[in-house]
Image: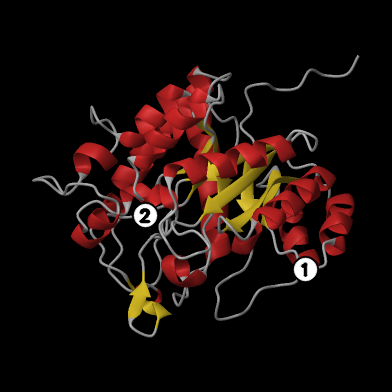
Amino acid sequence: MSAQPNIRALPIGINLDGVLVHDGLGMPDAATRMAWVQQSGAFDYIEKNMDPSENFQPYLDGVQRYGVPIGVFGGIFCAGQDEHRMRWGLRMAGQLGARIFNMQLFARHADARPITDREVADFFLEALEHGQPSHCQPSLEVHVDMWSERFHRVEAVANLLAQSHVQLALTLDHSHLVFKIDNPHELALSDVDAGTDGGRSYLAPRQPRTLYTQWLQQGWVVHAHTRSVATGIAHNPRTWRTPTLPGRAIQYPLLQPAPELLYCAWDADALHDWKTAVQDLLAHMHAHPRHAPQQISCEFIPFADYGGGARYSIWDNNLACAQWLRGEWAKLIG
Protein backbone atom coordinates (compact mmCIF):
# COMPACT_ATOMS: atom_id res chain seq x y z
CA MET A 1 0.00 0.00 0.00
CA SER A 2 1.34 3.42 -0.91
CA ALA A 3 2.34 5.79 1.86
CA GLN A 4 -0.19 8.41 2.91
CA PRO A 5 0.74 12.00 1.99
CA ASN A 6 2.05 14.22 4.75
CA ILE A 7 -0.90 16.55 5.19
CA ARG A 8 1.12 18.70 7.59
CA ALA A 9 3.77 19.59 5.02
CA LEU A 10 3.78 23.20 3.83
CA PRO A 11 4.09 23.63 0.04
CA ILE A 12 6.58 26.41 -0.64
CA GLY A 13 6.99 27.95 -4.07
CA ILE A 14 9.16 30.52 -5.79
CA ASN A 15 8.32 33.29 -8.22
CA LEU A 16 10.32 32.45 -11.34
CA ASP A 17 11.39 36.11 -11.64
CA GLY A 18 13.49 35.50 -8.53
CA VAL A 19 15.55 32.69 -10.03
CA LEU A 20 18.62 34.75 -10.82
CA VAL A 21 21.61 36.14 -8.94
CA HIS A 22 20.89 39.84 -9.53
CA ASP A 23 19.67 42.08 -12.31
CA GLY A 24 23.19 43.12 -13.25
CA LEU A 25 23.74 39.65 -14.68
CA GLY A 26 20.48 39.33 -16.58
CA MET A 27 17.79 36.69 -16.44
CA PRO A 28 18.67 33.05 -17.23
CA ASP A 29 16.48 31.30 -19.79
CA ALA A 30 13.43 29.26 -18.79
CA ALA A 31 15.16 25.88 -18.84
CA THR A 32 18.06 27.12 -16.73
CA ARG A 33 15.77 28.66 -14.13
CA MET A 34 13.58 25.57 -13.88
CA ALA A 35 16.70 23.41 -13.54
CA TRP A 36 17.91 25.61 -10.68
CA VAL A 37 14.59 25.19 -8.91
CA GLN A 38 14.59 21.41 -9.35
CA GLN A 39 18.22 20.96 -8.35
CA SER A 40 17.85 23.11 -5.23
CA GLY A 41 15.22 20.81 -3.75
CA ALA A 42 13.92 23.84 -1.86
CA PHE A 43 10.63 24.47 -3.65
CA ASP A 44 7.47 22.50 -4.33
CA TYR A 45 6.09 24.64 -7.15
CA ILE A 46 6.81 27.62 -9.38
CA GLU A 47 4.83 30.85 -9.56
CA LYS A 48 4.86 32.35 -13.06
CA ASN A 49 3.77 35.80 -14.22
CA MET A 50 2.02 35.81 -17.58
CA ASP A 51 3.08 37.35 -20.86
CA PRO A 52 0.73 36.45 -23.73
CA SER A 53 3.47 37.24 -26.27
CA GLU A 54 5.80 34.74 -24.65
CA ASN A 55 6.37 31.22 -25.96
CA PHE A 56 5.07 28.98 -23.18
CA GLN A 57 6.36 25.75 -24.66
CA PRO A 58 9.68 25.92 -22.74
CA TYR A 59 7.71 26.10 -19.49
CA LEU A 60 5.44 23.21 -20.43
CA ASP A 61 8.52 21.23 -21.44
CA GLY A 62 10.28 22.24 -18.22
CA VAL A 63 7.43 21.00 -16.06
CA GLN A 64 7.72 17.59 -17.74
CA ARG A 65 11.51 17.52 -17.66
CA TYR A 66 12.16 18.82 -14.16
CA GLY A 67 8.99 17.74 -12.38
CA VAL A 68 8.34 21.07 -10.64
CA PRO A 69 4.75 22.19 -11.34
CA ILE A 70 3.60 25.72 -12.10
CA GLY A 71 1.24 25.97 -9.16
CA VAL A 72 0.41 29.68 -9.48
CA PHE A 73 -0.05 31.76 -12.62
CA GLY A 74 -1.07 35.40 -12.91
CA GLY A 75 -0.39 38.91 -14.06
CA ILE A 76 -1.08 42.65 -13.93
CA PHE A 77 -4.33 43.97 -15.41
CA CYS A 78 -6.10 47.21 -16.23
CA ALA A 79 -9.89 47.17 -16.05
CA GLY A 80 -11.54 48.24 -19.27
CA GLN A 81 -8.82 46.89 -21.55
CA ASP A 82 -7.35 43.65 -20.16
CA GLU A 83 -10.42 41.50 -19.62
CA HIS A 84 -9.56 39.41 -22.70
CA ARG A 85 -6.01 38.94 -21.39
CA MET A 86 -7.39 37.85 -18.02
CA ARG A 87 -9.59 35.26 -19.75
CA TRP A 88 -6.61 34.04 -21.80
CA GLY A 89 -4.55 33.77 -18.64
CA LEU A 90 -7.14 31.66 -16.90
CA ARG A 91 -7.29 29.28 -19.87
CA MET A 92 -3.50 29.00 -19.84
CA ALA A 93 -3.57 28.49 -16.06
CA GLY A 94 -5.81 25.48 -16.65
CA GLN A 95 -3.37 24.06 -19.21
CA LEU A 96 -0.47 24.63 -16.82
CA GLY A 97 -2.36 22.99 -13.95
CA ALA A 98 -2.14 26.10 -11.76
CA ARG A 99 -4.53 26.19 -8.79
CA ILE A 100 -4.29 29.95 -8.15
CA PHE A 101 -4.53 32.78 -10.67
CA ASN A 102 -2.95 35.80 -8.99
CA MET A 103 -4.23 39.18 -10.21
CA GLN A 104 -2.81 42.64 -9.67
CA LEU A 105 -5.46 45.16 -10.77
CA PHE A 106 -4.34 48.71 -11.42
CA ALA A 107 -5.77 51.57 -9.37
CA ARG A 108 -6.88 53.33 -12.54
CA HIS A 109 -9.34 52.24 -15.20
CA ALA A 110 -8.33 52.19 -18.87
CA ASP A 111 -9.95 55.62 -19.29
CA ALA A 112 -7.49 57.02 -16.70
CA ARG A 113 -9.98 57.67 -13.91
CA PRO A 114 -9.68 55.88 -10.54
CA ILE A 115 -11.26 52.45 -10.62
CA THR A 116 -14.34 52.08 -8.43
CA ASP A 117 -14.97 49.37 -5.86
CA ARG A 118 -17.84 48.13 -8.04
CA GLU A 119 -15.49 47.73 -11.02
CA VAL A 120 -12.99 45.81 -8.90
CA ALA A 121 -15.75 43.49 -7.74
CA ASP A 122 -17.03 43.01 -11.30
CA PHE A 123 -13.53 42.22 -12.59
CA PHE A 124 -13.18 39.58 -9.88
CA LEU A 125 -16.61 38.13 -10.62
CA GLU A 126 -15.77 37.77 -14.30
CA ALA A 127 -12.46 36.11 -13.43
CA LEU A 128 -14.27 33.75 -11.10
CA GLU A 129 -16.66 32.76 -13.89
CA HIS A 130 -13.83 32.03 -16.32
CA GLY A 131 -11.70 30.33 -13.69
CA GLN A 132 -14.27 27.65 -12.96
CA PRO A 133 -13.74 25.66 -16.19
CA SER A 134 -9.99 25.77 -15.54
CA HIS A 135 -10.41 24.70 -11.90
CA CYS A 136 -8.31 27.73 -11.00
CA GLN A 137 -9.08 30.17 -8.18
CA PRO A 138 -8.64 33.87 -9.09
CA SER A 139 -7.11 35.94 -6.30
CA LEU A 140 -6.66 39.72 -6.03
CA GLU A 141 -3.26 40.68 -4.65
CA VAL A 142 -2.86 43.50 -2.12
CA HIS A 143 -0.09 45.43 -3.82
CA VAL A 144 1.34 48.92 -4.37
CA ASP A 145 0.07 50.85 -7.39
CA MET A 146 -3.06 48.71 -7.43
CA TRP A 147 -6.62 49.45 -6.23
CA SER A 148 -5.76 47.65 -2.99
CA GLU A 149 -2.90 49.98 -2.04
CA ARG A 150 -5.65 51.95 -0.29
CA PHE A 151 -5.97 49.08 2.13
CA HIS A 152 -9.35 50.01 3.58
CA ARG A 153 -10.93 49.38 0.17
CA VAL A 154 -10.45 45.65 0.66
CA GLU A 155 -13.38 45.43 3.07
CA ALA A 156 -15.57 47.56 0.78
CA VAL A 157 -14.97 45.23 -2.18
CA ALA A 158 -15.56 42.19 0.03
CA ASN A 159 -18.92 43.64 1.08
CA LEU A 160 -19.94 44.20 -2.55
CA LEU A 161 -19.04 40.62 -3.45
CA ALA A 162 -20.98 39.34 -0.46
CA GLN A 163 -24.10 40.88 -1.99
CA SER A 164 -23.60 38.38 -4.84
CA HIS A 165 -22.99 35.59 -2.29
CA VAL A 166 -19.32 35.46 -3.31
CA GLN A 167 -16.36 35.61 -0.95
CA LEU A 168 -13.39 37.79 -1.78
CA ALA A 169 -10.14 35.94 -2.46
CA LEU A 170 -6.90 37.76 -1.65
CA THR A 171 -3.20 37.19 -2.06
CA LEU A 172 -1.43 38.53 1.04
CA ASP A 173 2.13 39.79 0.87
CA HIS A 174 3.06 41.41 4.18
CA SER A 175 5.96 43.26 2.57
CA HIS A 176 3.56 45.61 0.75
CA LEU A 177 2.09 46.70 4.08
CA VAL A 178 4.90 46.45 6.63
CA PHE A 179 7.42 48.48 4.59
CA LYS A 180 5.11 51.51 4.85
CA ILE A 181 5.47 51.74 8.65
CA ASP A 182 7.26 54.97 9.64
CA ASN A 183 7.16 56.18 6.02
CA PRO A 184 4.76 59.18 5.89
CA HIS A 185 4.70 59.36 2.08
CA GLU A 186 3.82 55.70 1.68
CA LEU A 187 1.25 55.82 4.47
CA ALA A 188 -0.47 58.73 2.75
CA LEU A 189 -0.72 56.72 -0.49
CA SER A 190 -2.62 54.08 1.45
CA ASP A 191 -4.86 56.48 3.35
CA VAL A 192 -3.38 55.21 6.61
CA ASP A 193 -3.08 57.77 9.38
CA ALA A 194 0.50 57.92 10.61
CA GLY A 195 -0.81 59.05 14.00
CA THR A 196 1.79 58.92 16.72
CA ASP A 197 2.99 55.41 15.88
CA GLY A 198 3.91 55.64 12.21
CA GLY A 199 0.97 53.51 11.10
CA ARG A 200 1.76 50.61 13.40
CA SER A 201 -1.78 50.36 14.72
CA TYR A 202 -2.91 49.18 11.26
CA LEU A 203 0.20 47.64 9.70
CA ALA A 204 2.29 46.09 12.46
CA PRO A 205 1.57 42.55 13.64
CA ARG A 206 -0.38 41.80 16.82
CA GLN A 207 -2.21 45.10 17.04
CA PRO A 208 -6.00 45.21 17.68
CA ARG A 209 -6.68 46.83 14.28
CA THR A 210 -4.02 45.12 12.14
CA LEU A 211 -5.57 44.96 8.69
CA TYR A 212 -4.08 41.72 7.42
CA THR A 213 -5.04 39.93 10.63
CA GLN A 214 -8.65 40.94 9.99
CA TRP A 215 -8.44 39.67 6.39
CA LEU A 216 -7.15 36.31 7.62
CA GLN A 217 -9.88 36.07 10.22
CA GLN A 218 -12.50 36.73 7.53
CA GLY A 219 -11.13 33.84 5.47
CA TRP A 220 -10.40 36.09 2.49
CA VAL A 221 -6.71 35.15 2.11
CA VAL A 222 -6.27 32.18 -0.25
CA HIS A 223 -2.63 32.64 -1.27
CA ALA A 224 0.48 34.29 0.18
CA HIS A 225 3.79 35.73 -0.94
CA THR A 226 6.73 36.41 1.29
CA ARG A 227 9.75 38.69 1.01
CA SER A 228 11.48 40.36 3.91
CA VAL A 229 11.28 44.11 4.47
CA ALA A 230 12.39 46.67 7.03
CA THR A 231 10.43 49.71 8.17
CA GLY A 232 11.23 53.39 7.80
CA ILE A 233 13.41 53.15 4.67
CA ALA A 234 12.46 55.98 2.36
CA HIS A 235 13.29 54.36 -1.00
CA ASN A 236 15.71 52.28 -3.05
CA PRO A 237 18.17 54.81 -4.50
CA ARG A 238 19.93 52.21 -6.67
CA THR A 239 17.14 52.16 -9.28
CA TRP A 240 14.44 54.54 -10.50
CA ARG A 241 10.84 53.93 -11.50
CA THR A 242 10.88 57.11 -13.60
CA PRO A 243 13.62 59.70 -14.23
CA THR A 244 12.44 61.57 -11.12
CA LEU A 245 11.02 58.78 -8.97
CA PRO A 246 13.29 56.33 -7.11
CA GLY A 247 12.32 52.75 -6.44
CA ARG A 248 10.46 51.78 -3.32
CA ALA A 249 12.14 49.74 -0.56
CA ILE A 250 9.86 46.68 -0.64
CA GLN A 251 12.75 44.26 -0.22
CA TYR A 252 15.33 44.09 2.54
CA PRO A 253 17.57 41.03 2.34
CA LEU A 254 17.05 38.19 4.78
CA LEU A 255 20.74 37.34 4.55
CA GLN A 256 23.34 39.92 5.56
CA PRO A 257 24.99 41.23 2.38
CA ALA A 258 28.42 42.75 2.02
CA PRO A 259 28.08 46.47 2.88
CA GLU A 260 28.63 47.67 -0.67
CA LEU A 261 25.81 45.47 -2.02
CA LEU A 262 22.95 47.26 -0.28
CA TYR A 263 21.82 50.90 -0.28
CA CYS A 264 21.63 51.11 3.53
CA ALA A 265 23.11 49.50 6.61
CA TRP A 266 21.82 45.97 7.27
CA ASP A 267 20.53 45.07 10.73
CA ALA A 268 18.97 41.71 11.63
CA ASP A 269 16.68 43.43 14.14
CA ALA A 270 15.09 45.42 11.28
CA LEU A 271 13.41 42.17 10.17
CA HIS A 272 11.44 41.81 13.40
CA ASP A 273 8.06 43.18 12.27
CA TRP A 274 8.07 41.25 9.01
CA LYS A 275 9.16 38.01 10.64
CA THR A 276 6.50 38.31 13.33
CA ALA A 277 3.81 38.96 10.71
CA VAL A 278 4.81 35.89 8.70
CA GLN A 279 5.03 33.76 11.84
CA ASP A 280 1.48 34.81 12.68
CA LEU A 281 0.38 33.89 9.14
CA LEU A 282 1.95 30.45 9.45
CA ALA A 283 0.28 29.90 12.82
CA HIS A 284 -3.07 30.86 11.30
CA MET A 285 -2.50 28.52 8.35
CA HIS A 286 -1.69 25.70 10.73
CA ALA A 287 -4.68 26.34 12.97
CA HIS A 288 -7.22 26.85 10.15
CA PRO A 289 -6.34 24.49 7.29
CA ARG A 290 -9.77 24.85 5.68
CA HIS A 291 -9.98 28.63 5.90
CA ALA A 292 -6.44 29.83 5.23
CA PRO A 293 -3.90 29.42 2.42
CA GLN A 294 -2.00 26.16 2.50
CA GLN A 295 0.93 27.29 0.38
CA ILE A 296 3.27 30.27 0.26
CA SER A 297 5.56 31.62 -2.47
CA CYS A 298 8.98 33.12 -1.80
CA GLU A 299 9.23 36.31 -3.83
CA PHE A 300 12.60 37.98 -3.61
CA ILE A 301 12.85 39.61 -7.03
CA PRO A 302 14.76 42.32 -8.96
CA PHE A 303 12.99 45.43 -10.38
CA ALA A 304 13.02 48.99 -9.09
CA ASP A 305 10.75 48.60 -6.04
CA TYR A 306 12.53 45.47 -4.81
CA GLY A 307 16.11 44.30 -5.34
CA GLY A 308 16.81 46.34 -8.45
CA GLY A 309 20.30 47.82 -8.61
CA ALA A 310 21.52 45.98 -5.53
CA ARG A 311 24.02 43.23 -6.05
CA TYR A 312 23.27 40.77 -3.26
CA SER A 313 22.08 37.34 -4.41
CA ILE A 314 18.32 37.28 -4.90
CA TRP A 315 18.45 33.51 -5.45
CA ASP A 316 20.29 32.92 -2.17
CA ASN A 317 17.68 34.99 -0.31
CA ASN A 318 14.87 32.93 -1.82
CA LEU A 319 16.63 29.75 -0.73
CA ALA A 320 17.17 31.15 2.77
CA CYS A 321 13.53 32.24 2.99
CA ALA A 322 12.31 28.75 2.06
CA GLN A 323 14.58 27.25 4.72
CA TRP A 324 13.35 29.73 7.33
CA LEU A 325 9.69 29.03 6.47
CA ARG A 326 10.21 25.28 6.79
CA GLY A 327 11.90 25.78 10.13
CA GLU A 328 9.04 27.92 11.44
CA TRP A 329 6.48 25.40 10.15
CA ALA A 330 8.35 22.57 11.86
CA LYS A 331 8.03 24.39 15.18
CA LEU A 332 4.25 24.54 14.68
CA ILE A 333 3.73 20.90 13.84
CA GLY A 334 6.05 19.72 16.62
Task: Describe residue 79's horizontal placement relative to residue 206 as left or right.
Answer: right
Give percent across and percent down for residue 174.
40, 45
Give percent across and percent down for residue 30.
77, 66
Residue matched to label 1: 54
Q: Nearer the viewer, residue 143 or 247?
A: 143
> Does residue 135 lie above or below 145 as drawn?
above
Task: Describe residue 130's horizontal placement relative to residue 229 as left or right.
Answer: right
Q: Nearer the viewer, residue 87 or 5?
A: 87
Task: Describe residue 301's horizontal placement relative to residue 188 as left or right.
Answer: right
Residue matched to label 2: 229
Position of the N terminus, as image quadrant, is top right
Task: Describe residue 242's horizontal placement relative to residue 15 as left or right.
Answer: left
As measured in the structure, the alpha-carbon distance from the residue carrying label 2 to the one carrying label 1 is: 31 Å
Q: Amino acid at mark 2?
A: Val
Give percent across and percent down for residue 190.
29, 51
Q: Residue at point 44% right, 56% down?
A: 107
Give percent across and percent down for residue 76.
58, 58
Please say whether residue 323 is visible from this viewpoint. Answer: no
2 or 1: mark nearer the eye: 1
Asked which secondary structure carries label 1, the reply is loop
Query: Cβ–Cβ below 8 Å for labels 2 and 1?
Result: no
Q: Amino acid at mark 1?
A: Glu
Disc 2 crowd rating (10 Å Cα; few below 14, some 14-19, many 20+) is: many
Residue 244 occupies quadrant? bottom left
Disc 1 crowd rating (10 Å Cα; few below 14, some 14-19, many 20+) is: few
Q: Nearer the viewer, residue 178 or 85?
A: 85
